[in-house]
Image (cartoon, rainbow, N blue to C red):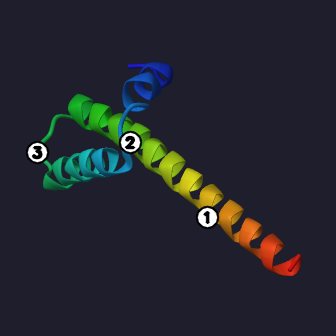
């Protein structure tokens, strides 16, 4: 799976869905006993899921920053 394909498949995931899937990947990797090829595929999947989570968090941060800036602008102009 290429990075672009992974992004397209994961773009529709909500934060909680991506986080839960990432936790599942981590559990599988930590449990061990997975063949190397499958471990690498899990690692790549985890990286894509982490990117989805980060995009959600970045978006939430931007919304929070915008709200705080708007609030600060309203109180300064009163």
Nearer-N-terminus badge (3/2): 3
Distance of label 1 from label 3 (alpha carbons):
42 Å
Residue annotated with mark 2: 49
Could you say where residue 37 lies in the image, as x and y percent from the top left? 25, 29
Which quadrant is the C terminus positioned in? bottom right
Assess whether mark 2 and mark 1 are in contact (beta carbons under 8 angstroms).
Answer: no
Could you say where residue 64 lies in the image, as x and y percent from the top left? 61, 64
Q: Nearer the viewer, residue 30 or 5?
A: 5
**SS under mark 1:** helix
- Left or right, 72 with reference to 37: right
Q: Residues within 10 Å of mark 1 (few under 14, many from 20)?
A: few
Q: Nearer the viewer, residue 51 or 29?
A: 51
Distance of label 3 from label 2 (alpha carbons):
22 Å
- Left or right, 23 with reference to 14: left
Residue annotated with mark 1: 64
- Choose mark 1 or mark 2, whichever is in front: 1
Residue 31, image quadrant: bottom left
Seen at 51% across and 56% down, the residue is 57
Residue annotated with mark 3: 33
**SS under mark 3:** loop
Residue 1, image quadrant: top left
Distance of label 1 from label 2 (alpha carbons):
23 Å
Q: Is residue 4 above or below residue 75?
A: above
Nearer-N-terminus badge (1/2): 2
């Amino acid at each position: 799976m290429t990075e672009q394909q992974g992004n397209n498949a994961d773009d529709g995931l909500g934060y909680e869905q991506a986080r839960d899937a990432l936790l599942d990947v981590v559990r599988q990797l930590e449990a061990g006993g997975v063949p190397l090829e499958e471990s690498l595929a899990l690692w790549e999947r985890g990286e894509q899921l982490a990117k989805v989570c980060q995009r959600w968090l970045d978006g939430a941060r931007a919304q929070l920053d915008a709200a705080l800036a708007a609030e600060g602008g309203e109180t300064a102009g009163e």
